[in-house]
Amino acid sequence: MASLVPSLGQLVSDATCLFKKLFNDEAPKIAACAPGRVNLIGDHTDYNQGYVLPMALSLVTVVVGSASSGQEAIIVTASELADEPKKVDLSLPNEGFPSFPGLPHWANYLRGIMHHYRALPLPGFRAVVVSSVPLGSGLSSSASLEVAFYTFLQQLRPAPVPAAAKHPHNMMLPPPRFTFDDGDKVAKAIACQQAEHTHAGVPCGIMDQLVSVLGMEGHALLIDCRSLESIPVPLSDPGLVFLITNSNVKHSLASSEYALRRGQCEKAASILGKPSLRDATVNDLEDSHSGHGPTMKISDPSMISKWEDFHYSRVSTYSYCSTLFVFPVPAWHCNKLTLYSLSPSQESRAQLDDVTYRRASHVIGEICRTLKAAESFKNGSFQEFGKIMVESHNSLRDLYEVSCKDLDDLVCAAMEVEGVFGSRMTGGGFGGCTITLLKADAIHRTIQNIQGVCILELFGPH
Ligand code: GLA
């Protein structure tokens, strides 16, 4: 069944009730929130300094609370899936004193934020966290927690830039990081990303935190993960819908696979003699040993310079739980989706081993696809956008090997329906969600078909 997303007001009200129940019926004085995200295209490109096209969701994390006397920092999560205990006391570190990761795991995101917060020292406080972003679903529940908590801390100790702090050469002052928060949004996203690196152990890229900080209602963001500049992309066509389907397979980015992929990309860039795979082309990949010519043209970023002229579509999101979908979809569903072919030369594999070659192929292709997809939105070519989505899914499945059977089945089931333009896994992979672009009037038959395929598999053909 399609799940209803609780409103922001409902979440704040739930968090306020819990806060009052836990803390002597006192009403919290501060509320902060930050959204989860879905990535329309451009996965595993952010840590290669490429392009991504995510949009913020109405699924959000809310933090409510108040300052208190003393140095206690008491935080309670309402999340049933968070590990025990749900209540932690992260007593405030002294200025410049590091906080270390520990148990429970969910609190590591908060420890990380307190460690990297740019306006220490903090007063004591009490807080409650509630969220409508499903944990481990690939919709950035962790980034939304980090950004919401960072925003909460910013309100807890509003810190206008002191005049003296504007003079970084004044040696009487402690390092600026410990004295003020200049309100820079990109710096805030970077601090949240750092928290995830140092305290959650995930060497993630910048996409999730950046879109959680900068995301705008009714827009996607085309982010250049090298310059960290982003361009809002209005999604304003009432005739279109993005459908998010949750496989309910919990992914774990902290597992070694994400870090392994990142390492393979760095190795490929190093062999190709490039600072990152953003700088590499298919030519480089193919020519790295053989000197063979190009097999594919990479889009020129200048193609996307005139964003104001673009015609975009308004997009609604639906969340769909696929708990019942435990039976395999027949293989022919997938075969007809293979839209690309790649023929790696034996010579380039001599330098880049097969696995590293395929990882690099995905990243170089995905950066190109993200630009092409953005351009096709500009032209209102949703058919083309959908085709690129499927190419992206196939590449993540076959070259980057981060998909799984449940995600492949959801993509296949969506692609059978008339009115569906394209579908792909989204985010880090190994479970989580798919994202599907379709005509608004196809939404019910798309949901039905996904259910129908699974019911068919469940009971077998008659
Ligand atoms: C996770 C990471 C992001 C990004 C995606 C894959 O969501 O947090 O930085 O790498 O995976 O695109």
Image (cartoon, rainbow, N blue to C red):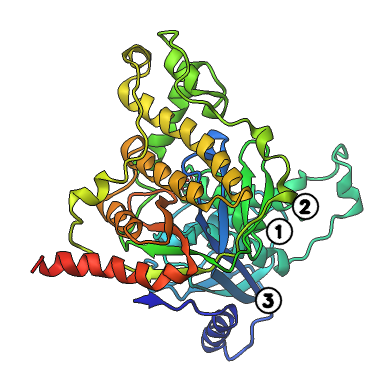
The picture places residue 419, in percent across and down from the top left corner, at: 42, 62
Front-lying residue, 292 or 43:
292
- Quadrant in which the N terminus appears: bottom left
Front-lying residue, 323 or 381:
381
Camera-near label (3 vs 1) is 3
The picture places residue 71, in percent across and down from the top left corner, at: 63, 67
Q: In the figure, 232 relative to 35: above or below?
A: above
Residue topped by disc 2:
179
Residue 121's label in the rendered image is: 1
Q: Regarding mark 2 in the picture, which secondary structure is present there?
A: loop
Q: Residue at x 73, y 50 (%)?
A: 309
| Quarter-of-image position of residue 462 | bottom left
Q: Is residue 388 visible?
A: yes
| Quarter-of-image position of residue 352 | top left
Residue 245's label in the rendered image is: none
Query: Mark 1: few, some, or many residues within 10 Å (few <14, many ≥20)?
Result: some
The picture places residue 391, in percent across and down from the top left corner, at: 40, 42
Front-lying residue, 425 or 437:
437
Single out the residue that lies furthest toward the left: 462
Q: Residue at x 17, y 67 (%)?
A: 456
Label located before the other in sequence (2 or 1) = 1
Single out the residue that lies furthest toward the bottom: 25
Inspect the image, locate mark 3, and give the three-letter code of the amino acid beneath it. Answer: Ile
Label located before the other in sequence (3 or 1) = 3
